[in-house]
Amino acid sequence: MTRSRTGLVLGVLAIAAVVLALWPRHANQPDPARLPMPASMGPAVAQRGSPNAPTAGDRSPAAKGGRPSLNPSSLVNRGAPLPPPGQPLTQIYDQLKQQVAHGDARAACRLGFEINRCAQLPVLRSVPRMFQQASQRYAPGTPQYENARRVQQQAERNLQSAEGACAGFTVDDPSISWDYTLAAALAGNREAIFSALSFPPGLNASRPENTLEGWTQWRQYAPQLMEAGIALGDPRVFRIAARNYLAPSFGTRIVDADPARSLALLSALLPVTAPSYRPVIERDISAIGASQEQQEDARRIASSLPRLTNIPEGGVDWARGMAPDSNGKQCEEP
């Protein structure tokens, strides 16, 4: 498998996660309901025309030409019900665009998810076979075999869902999905924050020069998106942030190295982790190799972290990815 194709597969695994109620917030953390928008954000996202009319060349429902006109400061996480998941995008594209034009951040998140999923269809089609081949390297009944089979089955379900939703829909410019996702994330949408931070939809990781403007925006906003996800108590963002405090993300260090803060975030996850996944978190905690002073700092930091929310029954288990069953419905969460 070429390096480029490997990068695409890893992108799909992170986005679609085949292999991404509010709690009172502390005063020293950003309000995720409305992230600060520096002046440079305006030209990057909001200057592309009137939100009430398509830009030149925008030929719905093929997502061709033009770019969406989005102003994060005018979006809120409420509005009319969104179309149910699973409907063909050709049938709901105009409705979602209209809801975005009326200020619905949830609809912007949903459009970002749907357009990106359709753009990734060629790679999604290759994932089930990849994990089928992976399972053949292990003896039936072993944990490695069973995990590969579970991921393969999940990939097959995701592919079937995507094939139905994307029938007849073409994407000429996948980076449009980044515009929608970033705008929704900056408006405080929980799912868009996770998506934009974990593996930004519409941005090419294997050839970053092809989506340079988007990656520039990602580097600019990733730190505040990460803090907003932590303030929301999103366990997925706790996990991502713990890694970011130790190592670069997509080749960029978005925050200074801070082993104590990483340890604090992982320690907060440990009590809500499913028994089967607990050894993974324990391994990562051990790998930090924190000094006594760093452990003391971590305990202090952990005491001020927001309470984790949206914990699944049975605890957190990311063996199949952080959002294995994502279908766009998650965009409707606060």
Image (cartoon, rainbow, N blue to C red):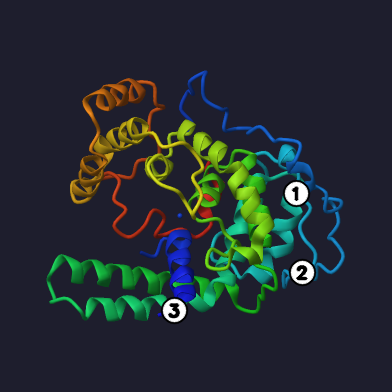
The answer to whether mark 2 and mark 1 are in CB contact below 8 A is no
Label 2 Cα crowd, 10 Å radius (few <14 / some 14-19 / many 20+): some
What is the distance, in whole Å, between disc 1 and disc 3 at their CAs?
33 Å
Q: Is residue 84 left or right of residue 247?
A: right
Q: CA distance from mark 2 to mark 3?
A: 34 Å
Q: Answer few, some or many: residues within 10 Å of disc 3's Cα (few below 14, many 20 plus, some between 14 and 19).
A: few
User: Residue 128: image x %, image y %?
Assistant: 37, 77
Which mark, residue 2? 3
List the residue tagged with mark 2.
60
Q: Which three-letter amino acid code belongs to the residue tagged 1? A: Ala
Quarter that holds the N terminus? bottom left
In the rendered image of this protein, does residue 15 appear above or below residue 228? below
Of helix, strand and loop, which one carries label 1?
Answer: helix
- Report the residue at 78% width, 69% height from top: 65
Give residue 105's position: percent from left, percent from top.
66, 45
* Residue at 39% across, 26% down: 305
Q: Where does the C terminus fall, quadrant-wise?
A: top right
Tell me the mark number nearer the camera, choosing from 2 and 1. 1
Q: Which of pointers 2 and 1 lies earlier in the amino acid sequence?
A: 1
- Dot 3 amino acid type: Thr
- The amino acid sitting under disc 2 is Ser
Relative vertical location of residue 91 with respect to residue 317 in this rendering, above or below: below
- Label 1: which residue? 44
Q: Nearer the viewer, mark 1 or mark 3?
A: 3
Tell me the CA gap for discs 2 and 1.
Answer: 22 Å
Mark 2 or 3 closer to N-term? 3
Asked if residue 77 shows in the view, the reply is no
Query: Which residue is located at x 64 percent, y 68 percent?
Result: 89
**Circle 2 — which element?**
loop
Return the mark for residue 230.
none
Whether residue 224 is visible, yes or no, is yes
| Earlier residue among tags 1 and 3 | 3
